[in-house]
Amino acid sequence: MSILDDKKKIVILGGSYGGASTAHYLLKHAIPKLPDPKSYQLVLISTSSQTMCRPAAPRALISDAMFPQDKLFVSIPESFSQYAAGSFVFEQGTVTALDHENRTVSVSLAKSGDSSSAELKVAYHALVIATGASTLSPLLGFIHDEVALKSSWAAFRTALPKAKHIVVTGGGASGVEVAGELGEHLNGRAGWLSSTLSNPKVQITLLSGGSRILPYLRPAIAQTAETYLAKLGVRIVHNTRVTTVAPAAAGIEDIATNATLTLDNGETLQADLYIPATGAIPNTNFVSDTLRCPDGRINTDVSTLRVVGAGERVYSIGDASSAARPAIHNIISMVPVLCANVKRDLLLAAGQSAQVAGEDRIFKEDTRETQLVPIGKSKGVGAAMGMKFPSFLVWLIKGRDYWLWTTGNLWSGKQWTKES
C-alpha cells in the first residue's frame, strides 16, 4: 500500500508504545467519526519494521532463550493489516527533517538488502511525534532497527563467557536491572543467611553518579535494592562518574572490546565489558531548536499534548515529549487524551462546529511514586501510585517477563478496542 496524494495524511513518527498505540486508537475511534473517513490516510513511520518490548532488554540481551522471540519482536505492518485498504501505510525509515512552517516531514527510507536509501517527503494534515529516545548502549533498545539490536546482542553474548569484570554505569532502573540480570546469570544468588555473595565468578561493578541508586523511589526502597544486588555479587560505587573511555567506542560502537574507564575521582577501572546505562537521549534532532526544550525533548503543552509553536494539529507523546516523565505508564495514560484532542482538531478542520467537536481533553500526569525494578529473576523493588510493593508483587507484575505479558494487546490494538 502506498501513500496517496489525494488523501489528508495523519502522520505518526515512531512505532513503539506511543506511536503504535496512537495509530490504533485513531484508526478505531477518531478517523471513522470524521465527516469523510475515506479522505484520510494514517502514515506510520519508524526506523524499524518491528516493535519490541523494550523494557525486557536487560534480560533479553543475555540469550534468545530468555523470551519467546515471536512475542518479543512483533511486525508493525502485520499488526495493522486489520484495517481497511488505503487507510494505513507503514514506511520504514529515519526522519531527517520537520518543516513545521510548510507542514512536511522528510524521511530517509530503508531499502531491504541495499545500503543506499531513498528520500521521501510527506505533507501532513496532522502530525504526532512519538520518536522516543535512544540509549547510549545499543544493547538496550532500537538505536537503528531490530537487525542492529540483534547484532549487538550477538557480539555481547560471544564475549560474555570470557568476561571477568563487567562495569555498568547508571544508578537508574536500567543500570540496576542490567547489573541484577548479569549478576544472577553469571554468579547465582547468595543463600538466605548471607548478606553478600562471596567470591563471585564475575566481578560486576555498578557506578552510580548520585548518592544512591533508583532516585525515583524512596531511599528505603533503594537500600533494599542494594541488598538484593549484593547477594548477586554486584558492587555498587556511589557518587562516581566516568569521565573518559578508552577506546572511545567501547560499549557504544564496539560492544565486546575491553575498556579502560577513567573516573571523576582520578581512579581507573579495567572492564572486559562496559555497558553505559546512564539514561536516554530524545530522538528529536530532526526538529527545529525553536520547538525543543533545553533537554532536547519536544516542547509540549502538558494539558493538551499539542506541540508549542508548531502550528495546527501537531502533537507529541512519550519519551520525546516534555509533557511528563518518560515512563510507559505515562504514555498509556496519554494516548486517550492525545487522540481525543486530535479527533477534536480534525473535526474542526473538517468544518464541524465547536459544539460538535467538543472541548479539549486534559492530561494530568500522575506524579505519585511509581516504578517497578526487577533484580534478577526472583526479586524486585518498587512502588505504584505511592504504595510500596513487596518483592513478590514486583516479580509477579514485571519481573516474570518484563511486561511481555502486556504487549500482545498493545501491539495488536486490542488494548484500545474501547474508546476511553
Image (tube, rainbow, N blue to C red):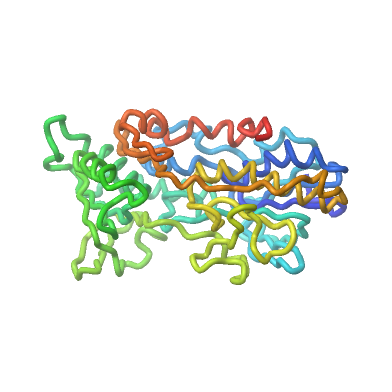
Q: Position of residue 386 (x, y in %)?
A: 39, 40
Q: Nearer the viewer, residue 113 or 311?
A: 311
Give the image quarter of residue 184: top left
Q: Nearer the viewer, residue 304 or 246?
A: 304
Quadrant the C terminus occupies? top right
Quadrant the N terminus occupies? top right
Could you tell whether 365 is left or right of 198 in the image?
right
Give the image quarter of residue 88: top right
Task: Say if 217 sits above or below 258 in the image.
Answer: above
Task: Say if 399 sits above or below 326 in the image.
Answer: above
Could you tell whether 227 is left or right of 368 in the image?
left
**Point 18% across, 42% down: residue:** 201
Q: Is residue 111 visible?
A: no
Could you tell whether 406 is left or right of 208 in the image?
right
Q: Is residue 86 visible?
A: yes
Q: Position of residue 283 (x, y in %)?
A: 54, 59
* Count of all numbered marks drawn on residues in the image: 0
**Point 75% across, 51% down: residue:** 10
**Point 14% across, 40% down: residue:** 196
**Point 24% across, 61% down: residue:** 239
Q: Position of residue 83 (x, y in %)?
A: 75, 35
Q: Position of residue 292 (x, y in %)?
A: 57, 66
Q: Nearer the viewer, residue 161 or 307?
A: 307
Could you tell whether 350 is left or right of 47 in the image?
right
Give the image quarter of residue 396: top left
